Image: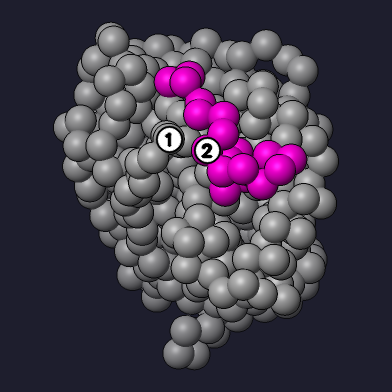
Amino acid sequence: MRITPELLQKYHDGLCTEAESREVEQWLAATDDLDGYAQQGDEEAAISEIWQKLDLQERHHPKPPRIAWLYPLLAAAAACLLLVASWNYFRHPATQPGSIAVVGKKIEYRYLQTADGERKRFLLPDSTVVYLNAGSRLTYPAGFSDTARVAWLTGEGYFEVAKDSTRPFTIHTASTRTTVLGTAFNLKSYPGSNVTLVVSEGKVRFASKTAGTAPLILTANERGIYDLREDRLAQDRVYARGHYGWVHDKLAFDNQPLSDIAPVLERWYGIKVVITAPELAARRCTGSFVNPSLENLMGSLAYSLNIKYKIENKNLTIY
């Protein structure tokens, strides 16, 4: 039986059959030192462990393109954190801000999601405004606690965080943690890609969950990058507005190879892109397009990159 995020959610909700529960418990037991994580109250270590296991499993058993593979991280992490050596649930209630384990009480979560080809604006309970780019998902508790505001992101979002000096706002991705009190920034973390944070205004703390480097403190027009391969943080200065133009239906490329542009087009238009030759994939493009149709965009790219293309149904072939 495959242990999927959906099955972990079902397990956390107490809806599994006896056989399913047994499989989930065996899978969780195979994760190193989960009991230690629960006893120490180390939520971050447990969450990181679950992300890594689900990501590894997904690489070996990929799903169809438009099915989100990270169904709620919260449920998986909660199930993991509440598991101890004797399988005594809720024996170690967590007390730190943003905790997902509460004795005798079921925590309800909300999920905001966009499909490929769509971008949406949402309002969170604390009046924070969130714009989700195509193929993205944000998980958060139905009600934030009195001491913290916590959310989990996969994909890309632009956040206008409501100011609250008493309750930091923290956004988790698979490998990073972003903390603010009230500011605006763009955070991008699609599966398998580097995590990029660009600050529009205010001050943001950007930290890796694994790298041994110190967190970055970023201000307006600064970018933080978590390099997935190198497992390290880096920062530089950028023109922030050029990195969240998608909020205003603007598609922008900054000296990017066609291989990097292809997945952007797939999410933006909800299509499948095939590049027929490595030489074509290496060609680079710089440009900005306001709410472009696929035909108009590809006409411009074909001219500037000296490529040919064919659009059939939901498939784009570049040759």
Q: Is residue 258 left or right of residue 206?
A: right
Would residue 200 be seen by someone viewing this image from the given angle? no
Residue 82 on image: x %, y %: 58, 41
Q: Depth check: 313 or 318 in front?
A: 313
- Give yes or no for contact between labels 2 and 1 (Cβ–Cβ under 8 Å): yes
Amino acid carrying mark 1 in the image? Val
Quick one: label 1, few (<14), some, or many (20+) residues within 10 Å?
few
Tell me: 176 left or right of 22: left
Check the image and tell me how it is coloured.
one colour
Dot 2 lies on which element?
loop
Residues shaded magenta: 79-97
Task: Compute the Cα span from label 2 to label 1.
Answer: 6 Å
Q: Which residue is mark 1?
A: 103
Question: Is residue 111 something that shows in the picture?
Answer: yes
The residue depicted at 82 percent of the width and 41 percent of the height is 32
- Up the image or down, 23 lies above or below 27; here it is below
Instruction: Please tell me which residue lies in front, 236 or 74.
Output: 74
Residue 233: quadrant of the picture: top right
Residue 170 falls in image quadrant: top left
Q: Amino acid at mark 2?
A: Phe
Tell me which residue sits at (33%, 17%) in the image.
147
Mark 2 surroundings within 10 Å by alpha-carbon count, few (fewer than 14), some (14 through 19), many (20 or more): some
Q: Position of residue 2 (x, y in %)?
A: 70, 72
**Magenta-drawn stretch contains 87:** yes
Q: Is residue 92 above or below residue 3?
A: above
Residue 292 image label:
none
The mark nearer the N terminus, 2 or 1, is: 2
Q: Provide the secondary structure element on which disc 1 rests.
A: loop
Q: What residue sits right under mark 2 in the picture?
A: 90
Residue drawn at x 54%, y 21% is 206
